[in-house]
Image (cartoon, grey):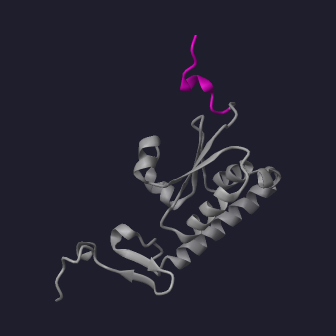
């Protein structure tokens, strides 16, 4: 008898690999991504831009719009973690932070983890502009560390628009 993916029992099977979906357009998310790849990992982490072609192909059943709004981590057994739970399972995968992850998985620790996620979300909203949304390259926004944000209407990117 051969086992199928459904037979693994995602609720009771150990996690052997995690895929972290992160917002590639968010400076905080990119910073955390860079930090994660430098950490010694007990469970391998694969970092994939949220809502990208790669993410959509690998996880067609996910709400990819929601993965841009809230960190989402997918386990190799089909487990899906969002928000504070996603942060905790990501820390659990790191050698130096597994003990902290266990503390954050307690009821009182979960409150702290949720507070950290809410603080990060508030920071993201504050730096993304007065509208609370995220500036996206596809919408015509670009960021230069020295000059800040600039906007070029998408139909002018190739230099095809004319001055009014």
Q: Is residue 10 magenta?
A: yes
Q: Is residue 155 left or right of residue 53?
A: left
Position of residue 102 relative to residue 139, above or below, is above
State the predominant SS element of the stretch in magenta: loop
Q: Position of residue 146 (x, y in %)?
A: 50, 86
| Quadrant housing residue 111 | bottom right
Q: Quadrant of the N terminus?
A: top right
Q: Position of residue 92 (x, y in %)?
A: 74, 49
Q: Position of residue 139 (x, y in %)?
A: 34, 70
Asked whether the viewer can see residue 105, the reply is yes
Of 104 and 92, the residue lying toward us: 92
- The magenta segment is 1-11
| Quadrant housing residue 42 | top right
Position of residue 121 relative to residue 87, above or below, is below
Asked whether the viewer can see residue 61, the reply is no
Residue drawn at point x = 82 percent, y = 53 percent: 103
């Amino acid at each position: 008898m051969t086992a199928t993916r459904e037979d693994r029992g995602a609720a009771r099977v150990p996690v052997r690999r995690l895929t972290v979906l992160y917002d590639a357009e968010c400076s905080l998310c990119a910073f955390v991504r860079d930090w994660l790849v430098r950490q010694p990992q007990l469970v391998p982490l694969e970092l994939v831009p949220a809502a990208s072609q790669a993410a959509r192909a690998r996880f067609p059943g996910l709400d990819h719009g929601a993965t841009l709004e809230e960190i989402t981590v997918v386990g190799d057994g089909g487990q899906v973690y969002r928000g504070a739970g996603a942060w905790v399972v990501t820390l659990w995968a790191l050698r130096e932070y597994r003990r902290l992850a266990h503390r954050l998985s307690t009821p009182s620790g979960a409150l702290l983890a949720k507070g950290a996620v809410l603080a990060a979300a508030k920071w993201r909203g504050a730096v993304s502009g007065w509208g609370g949304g995220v500036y996206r390259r596809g919408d015509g926004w670009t960021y230069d560390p020295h000059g800040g944000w600039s906007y070029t209407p998408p139909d002018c990117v190739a230099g095809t628009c004319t001055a009014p």
